[in-house]
Image (spheres, helix red, strand yellow):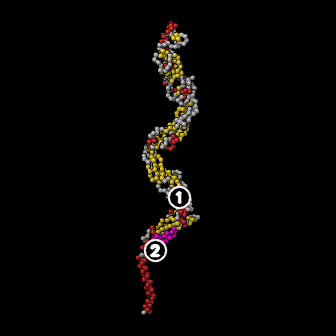
Amino acid sequence: MLKRLVKKLTNNIGLKILALLFSVAMWMAVVNISDPTISKPFTVAVTIENENAIASMNKYYEIANESTYVTFNVLGKRSIVQELSSSDFKAVADMSQLIQGKDKNIVRVEITALRYTSKLTISKRVQEIEVNLEDLMSTTLVIQAGTQGKPAEGYALGTMEVTPNLLKVSGPKEVVSQIDTVKAIVDISGMSMSVSDGVVPVLLDENEKAIDTTRLTLNLKTVTVKVNIVSEKTVPVKASYRGRPASGFEVISVKTDPAEVTIKGRSEILNAINSITIPENVISVDNVDEKFEQQVDLTKYLPEGVSLSNSKEASVIVKVDVEELERRVFTIPAGNISVDNLPEGFQIKFSDETVDMVIYGLKNDLDELSINEIRPILDVAGKVAGSHVGQLMLTLDAKYIVGDTTVSYTITSNNRPDPGQEPDDTTGDEGENNGNGQDSSPDDDQDNAGDNEPDDEDDDSTPAGSGNVTDTDTDTRGNDDSRSDQYQSE
């Protein structure tokens, strides 16, 4: 039985083997016709691994020629290949495997399939990309708050705060070294209230030009900037001084440049400020005989909580004008003298028809001074009948200084003879002795009393409002309230 079976199997063995091979070939042909093997190209972004290996070399790398993608072909069954996409593959460049050469630096890129690994064939599974190396630089910079635009009228920019205020930057040395400042800028156009905003820091070079950050690594993307908007006010600047100028000179004016400044702060503080005053102990005019200027830092004299809107106005120039004075003698008619506190029933007569008064001032001011403006006053309060010497008082504009002037005069009673008149021998014992052993009669007293009146009928008197002015050499003048005491009429 067994022999019979073996005989049947081996009978025409060649034909049988041929038939088997033909059958397999036919099956394979049918299979290939229905699901053939195909090739398809794919492009995948290169994934960089172990970048710290480059940083440990204190180097910065950059893929040359922007070759951050690789292209390859995949061979496999159509049913498999057609359902694949670029995301089914991974291209990895391991920077720890960087090969540095004299002319170029190479790193291998290995491509792997994430699916159907055993059923796919990848052409150019291992490729190479060129890497450029540069010196690496890292730095930490302070972020400065900045603004653009202007607040609403009557308001100004106050304090600004950036949080966080430090930015860490790393990248190629040639780029990082160009960074001069980092600013976070907020637009405050038309604002009248404080604001807080998220801002992207801007890197600027020394020319205030923005730096491209695409090759840089920053530890922050945005920061918070708080900007305070405060009130604003323009006030004058005033300056005082101490001391006295040189003999014969006077402080004519004290001015500041700028004459006014704009300050800012809380409205309740600004409302109480009408000016900024430089104290008198800052400017000294001791023994000065010419005009001068002095630079002053105004910020030292600002009230607490107040600052300047324009920092350029902090340096103020104080201009002190010191000029030499002129001494001039004005001859005043006695009729121009007003008498205060003369008792009723008494008369006064001046010994001289004119009085010389010394007045100090600038030439132009003295030229403008009229005799009619000089109206001295004599106060005779408490004086009795008889001869006296009194001090004339004269009030003029502050630009003039009046020297001391005395005048001799006689007071007489309408009911008593003038002590200086000689008595009439016919009056008898009723006359009073005048000091020379002679009596004066009542009749003479009346005549004398009439002569004491400075009327226009007196031939020897000068009409009120007329007089002479005599120019003399320059004399001394002080600058305080008691300075007129230095000048005595000569």
* Vertical order, 5 against 286 (above or below): below
Instruction: Please say whether residue 114 is one of the residues in the magenta stretch.
Output: yes
Q: Residues within 10 Å of mark 2 (few under 14, many from 20)?
A: few
Q: Position of residue 37 (x, y in %)?
A: 44, 75
Sort mark 1 into few (<14), some (14-19) or many (20+) by Cα contacts within 10 Å.
many
The kind of secondary structure element at disc 1 is strand
Q: Earlier in the sequence, mark 2 or mark 1?
A: 2
- Asked whether 393 or 84 is in front, the reply is 393
Q: Amino acid at mark 2?
A: Lys
Q: Which residue is depicted at the point 55% across and 11% down? A: 436
Which residue bears the numbered disc 2? 119
Asked whether residue 391 is in view, the answer is yes
- Quadrant of the drawing holding the N terminus: bottom left
Q: Provide residue 265's location: percent of width, then percent of height.
A: 46, 43
Viewer-proximal residue, 314 or 92? 314
Residue 102: where, in percent of width, then height? 58, 64
On the image, numbered disc 1 is attached to which residue? 171
Q: x, y percentage for residue 471? A: 55, 24
Give the residue displayed 47% in from the left and 66% down from the top: 44
Q: Within the image, what quadrant is residue 490 found in?
A: top right
Between 346 and 202, which is closer to the camera in this rendering? 346
- Magenta segment, which residues? 109-133
Q: Is residue 489 above or below residue 183?
A: above
Say whether residue 360 is visible: no
* Amino acid carrying mark 1 in the image: Gly
Q: CA distance from mark 2 to mark 1?
A: 43 Å
Instruction: Name the magenta segment's main secondary structure.
Output: strand
Total number of numbered labels?
2
Secondary structure beneath disc 2?
helix
Magenta segment: does it hold 225? Answer: no
